[in-house]
């Protein structure tokens, strides 16, 4: 295990030598032989500095440590090596060394949810690993906008995952343990804690690989279809993708009447119902919108059947009735989300639909209506003026066939 001089330990913790010395004087840090400090000491120094910034005094913390009321020994555990220390290089220095635009390197910390650093701020060890990935893309000729999109989406998705994991740990482990009289640091140092963290990390990587398999398969099929069409061995059907919006009737009123706990329960039940229905028909939930969900379907036909399944599933789950709108057409994919007129029209159709109703556009009927064995029929409800859409649109009510 590496150890550091007093100056190096302070530097890696991002504090001054005098600040680190104050921690030693208060007994919060205890250097080893030769005034050497461990990586755990560096983590303790940075954590205590952050604690101090919240208004907790060093004297009070030192007294608690002395009495044994609080301990920071758990930061020596290998699992906390993910608390990355500051390295030697600044963002600007690494940018010059790698030949990577400085704005792409500054994005690393911003995408993680922190304030954008300055070029002269030093990088953390883990940030250099991400910079290496960016460097490889730049040298391969990837467009900066594409690199930025991937880093932003990865950062935002993993931030939400980490925050959900922290909340899960707080409610399922820390809270019950503290209610039973244990200290938080005792819980963090248990074999169960370390084992669970290691398993969680492996599970997340396995889920990522599963998502990659699904997404990469889509790329492979699309490429094969393009090559076969170019060779005259395959006729590509005019089959535009569909966007779908599902809204819950009276969601806002319900949550106001019953409170946040009811809203959380409703959201959890809705998530299970619509996720199963959409995935079983080749679609996926793109994002949650408070009182509803936006979906993407590569094929409009299965999207209609999925919408009917979702409306039925919501009713069977005892939730307020859902209403759904679908529209097919060109879409724009950017930063993990979908944009364009097709998305906007689908949203407006959903707003127009009545409780328990699935409404679709003419484009959906043209794409899906000729499919044999679709399991759905369409009844025209006439030209309709939709908010924010120029001209009247022909809408159809979808029902079980």
Image (cartoon, grey):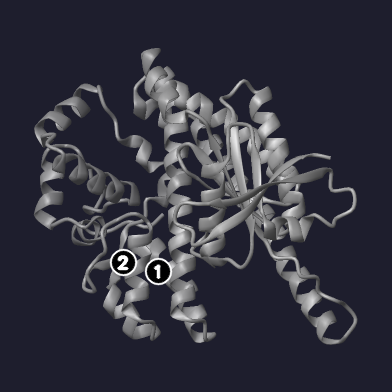
Please tell me which residue is depicted at 47% across the width and 31% down the height of the picture: 168
Q: Is residue 309 left or right of residue 289?
A: right
* Most distant residue in the front direction: 382
Q: Is residue 342 left or right of residue 85?
A: right
Q: Which mark is residue 123?
A: 2
Q: Residue 328, image x and y in percent?
A: 65, 60
Please tell me which residue is depicted at 21% across the width and 28% down the height of the picture: 65
| Observer able to see residue 77 | yes
Callout 1: 10 Å neighbours few (<14), some, many (20+)?
A: some
Q: CA distance from mark 1 to mark 2?
A: 7 Å
The quarter of the displayed image where residue 375 is located? top right
Q: Residue 395, image x and y in percent?
A: 64, 50
The quarter of the displayed image where residue 277 is located? top right
Quadrant assignment for the C terminus:
top right
Q: Secondary structure at mark 2?
A: strand
Q: Residue 279, image x and y in percent?
A: 71, 46
Q: Which mark is residue 91?
A: none
Q: Which mark is residue 128?
A: 1
Q: Nearer the viewer, residue 316 or 333?
A: 316
Quadrant assignment for the N terminus:
bottom left
| Observer able to see residue 189 | no
Please tell me which residue is depicted at 75% across the width and 44% down the height of the picture: 305
Q: Earlier in the sequence, mark 1 or mark 2?
A: 2
Q: Nearer the viewer, residue 281 or 355?
A: 355
Q: Nearer the viewer, residue 158 or 51?
A: 158
Q: Residue 361, image x and y in percent?
A: 65, 54
Dots 1, 2 in contact, CB < 8 A: yes
- Count of numbered labels shown in the rendering: 2
* Most distant residue in the top direction: 180
Please tell me which residue is depicted at 80% across the width and 44% down the height of the picture: 377
Q: Secondary structure at mark 1?
A: helix
Classify 4 as above or below 160. below
């Amino acid at each position: 295990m590496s150890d550091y001089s007093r100056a190096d330990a302070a530097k890696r913790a991002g504090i001054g030598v005098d600040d680190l010395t104050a921690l030693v004087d208060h007994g919060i840090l205890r250097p080893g032989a030769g005034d050497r400090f461990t990586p755990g000491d560096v983590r303790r120094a940075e954590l205590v500095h952050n604690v101090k910034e919240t208004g907790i005094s060093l004297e009070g913390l030192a007294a608690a440590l002395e009495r044994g009321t609080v301990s920071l020994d758990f930061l020596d555990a290998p699992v906390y090596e993910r608390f990355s220390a500051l390295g030697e290089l600044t963002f600007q220095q690494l940018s010059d060394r790698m030949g990577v635009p400085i704005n792409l390197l500054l994005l690393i910390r911003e995408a993680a949810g922190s304030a954008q650093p300055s070029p002269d701020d030093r990088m953390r060890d883990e940030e250099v690993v991400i910079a290496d990935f960016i460097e490889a893309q730049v040298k391969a000729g990837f467009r900066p906008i594409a690199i930025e999109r991937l880093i932003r989406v990865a950062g935002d998705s993993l931030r939400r995952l980490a925050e959900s994991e922290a909340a899960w740990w707080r409610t399922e482990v820390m809270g019950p343990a503290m209610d039973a009289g244990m200290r938080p640091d005792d819980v963090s140092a248990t074999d169960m804690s370390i084992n669970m963290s290691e398993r969680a990390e492996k599970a997340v990587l396995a889920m990522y690989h599963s998502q990659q398999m699904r997404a990469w398969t889509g790329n492979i099929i699309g490429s094969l279809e393009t090559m076969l069409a170019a060779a005259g061995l395959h006729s590509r059907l005019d089959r535009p993708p569909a966007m779908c919006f599902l809204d819950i009737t009276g969601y806002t009123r319900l949550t106001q009447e019953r409170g946040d706990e009811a809203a959380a329960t409703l959201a959890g039940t809705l998530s299970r119902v619509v996720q199963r229905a959409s995935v079983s028909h080749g679609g996926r939930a793109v994002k949650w919108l408070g009182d509803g969900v936006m979906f993407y379907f590569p094929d409009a036909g299965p999207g209609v059947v999925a919408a009917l399944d979702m409306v039925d599933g919501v009713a069977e789950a005892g939730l307020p009735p859902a209403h759904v709108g679908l529209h097919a057409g060109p879409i724009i994919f950017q930063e993990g989300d979908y944009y364009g007129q097709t998305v906007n029209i689908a949203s407006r159709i959903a707003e127009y639909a009545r409780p328990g109703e699935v409404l679709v556009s003419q484009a959906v009927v043209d794409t899906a209506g000729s499919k044999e064995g679709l399991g759905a029929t369409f009844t025209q409800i006439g030209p309709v003026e939709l908010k924010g859409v120029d001209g009247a649109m022909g809408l159809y009510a979808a029902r079980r066939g």
